[in-house]
Image (spheres, rainbow, N blue to C red):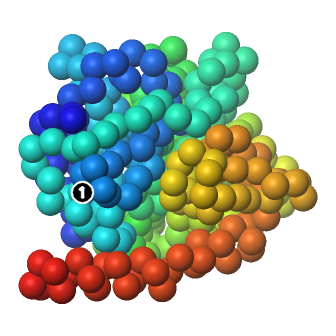
Amino acid sequence: MYKVIKNEKISSNSYYMEVNCPILINKAMPGQFVIIMTKKDSERIPLTIYDIDEEKETLKLIYQVVGASTEELSKEKKEVFAVVGPLGNANIICENPKEYKNKRIVYVAGGVGIAPVYPQVKYLNSKGIKVDIIYGARNKELLLIKDEIEKISNKVMYATDDGSYGTKGFVTNVLEENINNYDICVAIGPVIMMKNVCELTKKYNLPTIVSMNPLMIDGSGMCGACRCEIEGKPKFACIDGPEFDGHKVNFDLALKRMNIFKEEEKEKWEQMKRKSGE
């Protein structure tokens, strides 16, 4: 069992969680993820690592309530049954900072995708590499950890669908206006957002890395749900990724695969609500 230090709501459907996990934090690299099980009989939840506190020996996570499993996790205030990791591969830029030291790098984040962006930018900043961030959400309330990302980045450009903060529109609007300023792009967020970013960067021949973590369910390569097509070949986001060359990803197939368990998840969520009397 792992002690929960914090598990609190930070927006309408997003939570910040801190778990005591001394063994894991010494091995984690930006871009990797963990699997959490709230209880012994709970489903496995893959969550990208947001941050670590070496002094307190805690793992920090930001997650969104999107179904029954994350709803169950959001209500746990004392301990979780399991935390497994670090899993997946680290971000290639963070693994090879010397190779990218003179590159102009921009990170594009959508919604809760800012959580996996943060540790990568923080790590690069510690290596003397300053990067820009373009961060978008539906409205101002859904822009998370603004103060934190502004401290570690060279510049942050915001976009909101309703214009309540920053540019009114999408991250792609902001990216296109500034695209000639960069040598490489990293996009993390909803699959449709990453698809749109890659369609834009492909036109400008801007190399783009994407994180296919939204496809993951089991997180171990056993369930096959995160299978995606990269340059015509099958890959698993959890063990081969989660990051890939965005210009080689079949996003249309990825979007279809995201709906495979939609009805089953809806039924389980309804069962949970009935059980709790909601």
Horizontal side, residue 159 vs residue 148: left or right: right
Horizontal side, residue 3 vs residue 206: left or right: left
The quarter of the rendered structure image containing the N terminus is: top left
Residue 174, percent across and down? 56, 60
The residue beneath circle 1 is 73
Residue 239, percent across and down? 65, 41
Residue 13, percent across and down? 26, 67
Q: Amino acid at mark 1?
A: Leu
Quarter-of-image position of residue 273 = bottom left
Mark 1 crowd level (few <14, some 14–19, many ≥20, 10 Å Cα):
many
Closest to the observer, 39 or 14: 39
Vertical relation: 196 (above or below) 266:
above
Residue that extends furthest to the right in the rendered view of this protein: 232
Image point (45%, 32%), residue name? 85
Horizontal side, residue 181 vs residue 64: left or right: right
Closest to the observer, 130 or 259: 259
Vertical relation: 203 (above or below) 161:
above
SS category of the residue bearing label 1: helix
Quarter-of-image position of residue 111 = bottom left
Vertical relation: 150 (above or below) 218:
above
Residue 150, percent across and down? 35, 39
* Total residue callouts: 1
Image point (23%, 63%), residue name? 72
Vertical relation: 138 (above or below) 183:
below
